[in-house]
C-alpha cells in the first residue's frame, strides 16, 4: 500500500507544515505543564488553575491535531467543520496565553535566584512562609509560583511563548481550512461541469 498526502498545492503543504508545528509545540507545552504539576503534587499542594487549564487545552488540542490530520490524509476531513474547531482552539489558546502571561510581562527571570538542587524544596522555602493562605487552601498561587526560582520562571515563559505561537498557528490553519474547502468546492464544480459538457457533446 502506497501512502501519499492529498495533492492540494501550496495550501496543502502549508496545512501539513502548520499541523506539524502545532503538534511539536503542544507536546512541549504538555511536557512542561505536567512537570510543574508533578512538582507541586510532590509537595502535597494543589496546582494553580492556570496550569491545569493549560494542560487540559493542550491535551485536547493535540488529540484534535492528530485526528484531523489523519482524516485530512485520507481525504475524509470536513474542512469547514475543521475551520470552526481551529477557530475554537484559537480562542482557547488566546485565553491560555492571557492567563499565563499576566504576571510574566513584568517579571525579570534573570533577577530571580538560580534554582537549588531540590526544586520542590526551593519553591516551598521561598513561598510557604510568605503566603500563609497557601498552607490553608493547599492551592498554589500562580503569580508566586512563577517567581519561585529562575528555572521555573524561564520554563513558564517558554510555555507562554509557545501558547502565543499556537495562537498564530491555529489562526493560520483556520484560514487554510477555509481556503482548502473553497479550492475543493471549485475543483469539484469544474469536474462536474466538464462531465456535463461531454455528455451534451456526445
Image (spheres, helix red, strand yellow):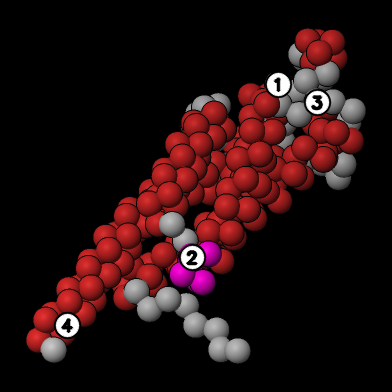
Name the residue that disc number 1 marks: 141
Number of labels in the image equals: 4
Whole-angstrom CA distance, mark 4 to mark 3, is: 70 Å
Dot placed on the residue nearer the N-terminal end, 3 or 1 = 3
- Residue at figure coordinates x 66%, y 39% from the top left: 56
Dot placed on the residue nearer the N-terminal end, 3 or 2 = 3
- Residue at figure coordinates x 90%, y 28% from the top left: 44
Whole-angstrom CA distance, mark 1 to mark 2, is: 45 Å
Dot placed on the residue nearer the N-terminal end, 1 or 2 = 2
Whole-angstrom CA distance, mark 4 to mark 2, is: 29 Å
Visible in this render: residue 109? yes
Quarter of the picture holding the N terminus: bottom right
**111 or 17: nearer the viewer:** 17
What is the x, y in percent for residue 4? 49, 82
Q: Which mark is residue 81?
A: none
* Magenta region: 71-76
Eye-nearest disc, 1 or 2: 2
Dot placed on the residue nearer the N-terminal end, 4 or 2 = 2
**Whether residue 30 is situated above or below residue 13 in the rendered picture:** above
Badge 4 element:
helix
- Answer whether labels 3 and 2 touch (C-beta < 8 Å): no
Name the residue that disc number 2 marks: 76
**Whether residue 79 is situated above or below residue 93 in the rendered picture:** below
Amino acid at each position: 500500500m502506497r501512502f501519499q498526502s492529498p495533492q492540494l498545492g501550496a495550501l496543502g503543504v502549508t496545512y501539513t507544515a502548520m499541523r506539524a508545528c502545532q503538534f511539536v509545540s503542544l507536546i512541549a507545552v504538555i511536557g512542561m505543564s505536567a512537570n510543574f504539576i508533578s512538582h507541586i503534587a510532590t509537595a502535597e499542594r494543589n496546582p494553580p488553575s492556570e496550569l491545569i487549564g493549560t494542560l487540559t487545552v493542550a491535551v485536547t488540542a493535540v488529540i484534535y491535531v492528530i485526528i484531523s490530520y489523519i482524516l485530512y490524509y485520507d481525504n475524509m476531513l470536513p474542512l469547514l467543520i475543521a475551520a470552526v474547531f481551529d477557530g475554537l482552539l484559537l480562542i482557547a489558546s488566546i485565553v491560555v496565553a492571557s492567563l499565563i502571561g499576566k504576571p510574566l510581562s513584568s517579571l525579570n527571570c534573570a533577577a530571580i535566584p538560580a534554582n537549588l538542587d531540590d526544586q520542590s524544596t526551593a519553591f516551598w522555602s521561598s513561598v510557604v512562609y510568605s503566603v500563609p493562605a497557601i498552607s490553608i487552601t493547599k492551592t498554589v498561587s500562580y503569580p508566586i509560583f512563577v517567581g519561585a526560582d529562575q528555572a521555573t520562571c524561564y520554563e513558564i515563559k517558554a510555555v507562554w511563548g509557545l501558547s502565543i505561537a499556537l495562537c498564530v498557528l491555529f489562526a493560520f490553519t483556520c484560514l487554510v481550512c477555509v481556503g482548502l474547502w473553497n479550492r475543493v468546492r471549485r475543483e469539484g464544480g469544474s469536474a462536474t461541469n466538464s462531465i456535463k459538457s461531454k455528455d451534451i457533446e456526445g
